[in-house]
Amino acid sequence: MTDQQAAAMQRARTELAACFRWTAKMDMHESIANHFSVAVSDDGQQFLCNPQGRHFSTIKASELLLLDANNPSTMKQANAPDPTTWAIHGALHRNLPDAGCIMHLHSRYATALACLKDKTMYPIDQNTMRFYQRVAIDTGFDGMGLGNEAERLTTVMGDKRILLMGNHGVLVIANSIAQCFDDMYYFERACRTLLDCYATGQPLDKVTHEVAEKTARQWQNYGFDFGQQHLNEIMTILDTQNNSYRL
């Protein structure tokens, strides 16, 4: 491994560990479940992910597992990952080599929306409009993400990068850790706003297709690396509070 490759690997470890810690701070995690991964090889087949049985709030950069999506003996190793981590992320990195970073959560509001009969993200504010017609909705839940279910999930996203997993949770794919986390954060905020509005019992004030699409494109073309700046600020805050995620 060259010095440049080693530096890139360490940066990936540090950024992903920061995302675990911040997700826990926002109470978007679930026990010792859920999982994030990031591809660290040119072919997208080798990836880092969280170790089995670790709470998001304690994960350190050095503890992230380095796995190969094409290694059938992974679950026989002494430091094997959680079975659903390996099944879902192994399948995604194996079948979608351009999936740089993958985050899967059972966060409160996204999961609640995933459990409604109508799972549509309606355009009612800037955050919901960010995802206008950009969310794939899976209605074929067939048990925990193991075996055939994990393989099936790789076929349902199409050209979308947000997957609302019916009766399950949410999965986000992006080119970078920062972008993936920013999309996950804003998707959860959008779900929260939508469900808060549903709770009033009043009709939703939906904007037109033209306005919603315009706003979504404005998000896409905002002009600077908003997601990376967001993550940089998170890491700055963590460094002042508890920088053990870097270890």
Image: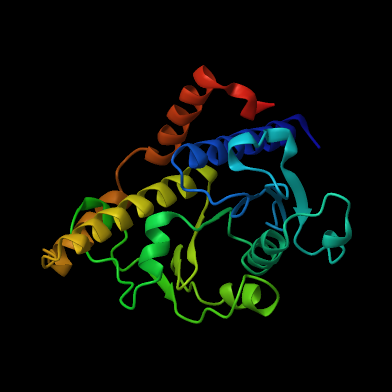
Between 86 and 178, the one lying in front of the other is: 86
Screen quadrant of the C terminus:
top right
Q: Front-most of 170 and 94?
A: 170
Q: Residue at x 53, y 46 (%)?
A: 176
The vertical placement of 132 against 32, above or below, is below
Residue lying farthest top? 240
Which residue is more in the foreground, 190 or 1? Answer: 190
Q: Residue at x 46, y 66 (%)?
A: 163
Tell me: residue 217, above or below residue 229: below
Quadrant of res 199: bottom left
Residue 159 visible: yes
Can residue 216 be seen in the rendering of this structure? no
x then y, percent, for residue 194: 25, 59
Q: Residue at image x 78%, y 34%?
A: 2
Q: Is residue 119 left or right of residue 161?
A: left
Kindly identify the residue that appears in the image at 71 percent across and 48 percent down: 53
Q: Is residue 1 left or right of residue 234?
A: right
Tell whether 7 sits left or right of 112: right
Q: Is residue 73 above or below residue 125?
A: below
Residue 155 position within the rendered picture, expressed as x and y whole percent measured from the top left: 56, 77
Measured as percent of width and height from the top left, residue 1 is found at: 81, 37
Quadrant of the rendered image containing residue 88:
bottom right
Query: On screen, 150 above or below 51?
Result: below
Q: Quadrant of residue 154?
A: bottom right
How many numbered discs sit on the rendered protein? 0
